[in-house]
Image: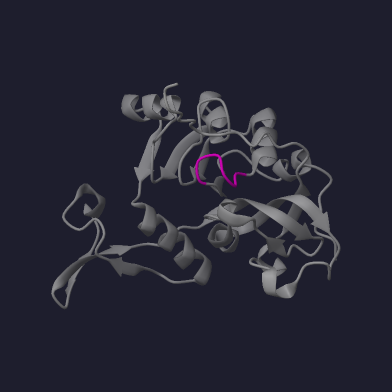
Amino acid sequence: MNKVLASADAAVALVPNGSSILMGGFGLCGIPENLIKALHAKGTRDLTVISNNAGVDDYGIGILLRARQVRKMVSTYVGENKEFERQFLSGELTVDLVPQGTFAERIRAGGAGIAGFFTPTGYGTLAAEGKETRLIGDRHYVLESPLTADFAFVKAWKGDRLGNLVYRRTARNFNPVMATAGRVTIAEVEHLVEPGELDPDHIVTPGIFVKHVVVGTTYEKRIEKRTVRQS
């Protein structure tokens, strides 16, 4: 079995307008850069993107926002992306803001087939509006639903032709849980190896969760925000 596609362009050709996509990454760390660029070039529109945040104005998911390819964002943080902030505040973009821990657990629940879970996070705030609440013991909890998507774009350090994935340090972030929660998971890897070359003890995402593999061609390794002391 060989799950490797010829290019990122071939991968995004599978994504129709109106799709929902889980996209790994934290800021610009661990994002599927080549898949995002290919999606931008293809011009796919009316997307629902589920990602911790939207990168920066001119990179990552930010280029999809700038091109008006995203209809809705499900995120935890508006952050450093001024265009994301502008579209959110002007009402041009639908945004569901989710507490970060709840965000991660909703995706994990989606991948595990869990129908919902109770969390104390957000009780008594706007995050709990319209949701079932319950007193359990001496604490109030909010019922949260799972998050899944039509596709998951994840970024790994190494992968083999069977779709087994290894991540590198903090670039792992949301990628492993997202890989389980997409109906079609496409993994972008920096290094492609043959089956058997990965140490089984180091594999984080088994190939059973991955439908397609794409080898990334270029990586800019940008710094999201550089802070230095005055000289």
For the C terminus, the image quarter is top left
Observer-nearest residue: 73 or 18? 73
**127 displayed left or right of 117:** left
Residue 59 % position (x, y): 58, 30
Q: Which residues are magenta?
A: 26-31
Residue 55 % position (x, y): 51, 35
Q: Of all residues shown, which one is farthest toward the front?
A: 231
At a point 58% along the width and 64% down the height, the residue shown is 180
**227 displayed left or right of 210:** left
Q: Of all residues shown, which one is farthest toward the top?
A: 231
Residue 206 lies, with reference to residue 42, above or below; the image says below
Residue 166 lies, with reference to residue 33, above or below; the image says below
Quadrant of the rendered image containing residue 172: bottom right
Residue 3 lies, with reference to residue 42, above or below; the image says below
Q: How is the image coloured?
A: one colour
Number of callouts: 0
Magenta-highlighted stretch: main secondary structure? loop
Residue 76 % position (x, y): 38, 46
At a point 44% along the width and 40% down the height, the residue shown is 73
Residue 86 shown in magenta: no
